[in-house]
Image (cartoon, rainbow, N blue to C red):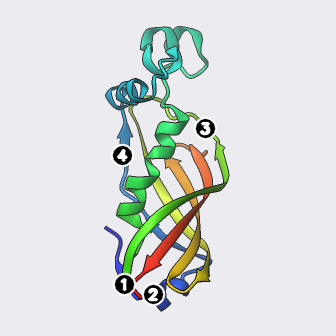
């Protein structure tokens, strides 16, 4: 879990790294479960033998959207908890790129930098967090994104 901070301390973090999550394995079981949930059973994700034979990856790879969905757990682990927050809402992305595939069995983690924090109205803060999902042992990231969130405070 991220450290608990005062609201003013959080605002002063703009422009700096605010947290790094634990490593998480994207194994074949998780990939298959995600495929079942999304009905995306493309062979590059769910057929290890065919993926090894017919793709440049040499194995199955995680869905890009599976990797993206891991941002939730990464953020719970890495981002600071701000005192006085009543809830946070995912507001979307301004930028999202899938850079490198994550082969089945690889570990990934999220690295977060607070790029911007702007008051939209009293008690409602718009945050822009730059996220880099790293693949353990790889030079290139799995994805990079500018993630938007709305943070609501007690009034």
The part of the image, by quadrant, that contains residue 47 is top left
Q: 12 or 54, which is in the foreground?
A: 12
Q: Which residue is depicted at the point 50% across and 27% down? A: 61
Instruction: From the image, tell me which residue sits under label 2.
Output: 7
3 or 4: tag closer to the N-terminus = 4
Instruction: Specify whether 34 is left or right of 101.
Output: left
- Crowdedness of circle 2 by 10 Å Cα count: few (<14), some, many (20+)? some
2 or 3: tag closer to the N-terminus = 2
- As measured in the structure, the alpha-carbon distance from the residue carrying label 3 to the one carrying label 4 is 16 Å
Check residue 84 in the rendering and tell me which mark sits there, or answer none.
1
- Crowdedness of circle 1 by 10 Å Cα count: few (<14), some, many (20+)? some
Tell me whether the residue at label 1 lies in contact with that at label 2, contact meaning CB atoms closer than 8 angstroms: yes
Element at badge 1?
A: loop
Tell me whether the residue at label 2 lies in contact with that at label 4, contact meaning CB atoms closer than 8 angstroms: no
Q: Which residue is depicted at the point 56% across and 34% down? A: 101
Mark 3 or 1: in front is 1
Q: Which residue is depicted at the point 42% across and 25% down? A: 35
Mark 2 or 4: in front is 2
1 or 2: tag closer to the N-terminus = 2
């Amino acid at each position: 879990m991220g450290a608990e901070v005062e609201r003013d301390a959080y605002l002063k973090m703009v422009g700096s790294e605010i947290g790094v999550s634990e490593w998480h394995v994207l194994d074949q079981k998780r990939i298959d479960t995600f495929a079942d949930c999304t009905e995306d059973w493309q062979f590059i994700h769910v057929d290890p033998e065919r993926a090894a034979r017919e793709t440049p990856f040499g194995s199955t790879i995680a869905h890009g959207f599976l990797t993206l969905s891991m941002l939730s757990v990464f953020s719970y682990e890495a981002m600071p908890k701000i005192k006085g927050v009543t809830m946070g809402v995912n507001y979307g992305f301004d930028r999202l790129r899938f850079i490198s595939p994550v082969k089945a069995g690889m570990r990934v983690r999220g690295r977060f930098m607070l790029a911007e924090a702007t008051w939209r109205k009293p008690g409602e803060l718009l945050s822009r967090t730059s996220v880099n999902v790293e693949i353990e042992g790889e030079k290139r990231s799995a994805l990079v994104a500018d993630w938007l969130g709305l943070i609501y405070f007690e009034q």
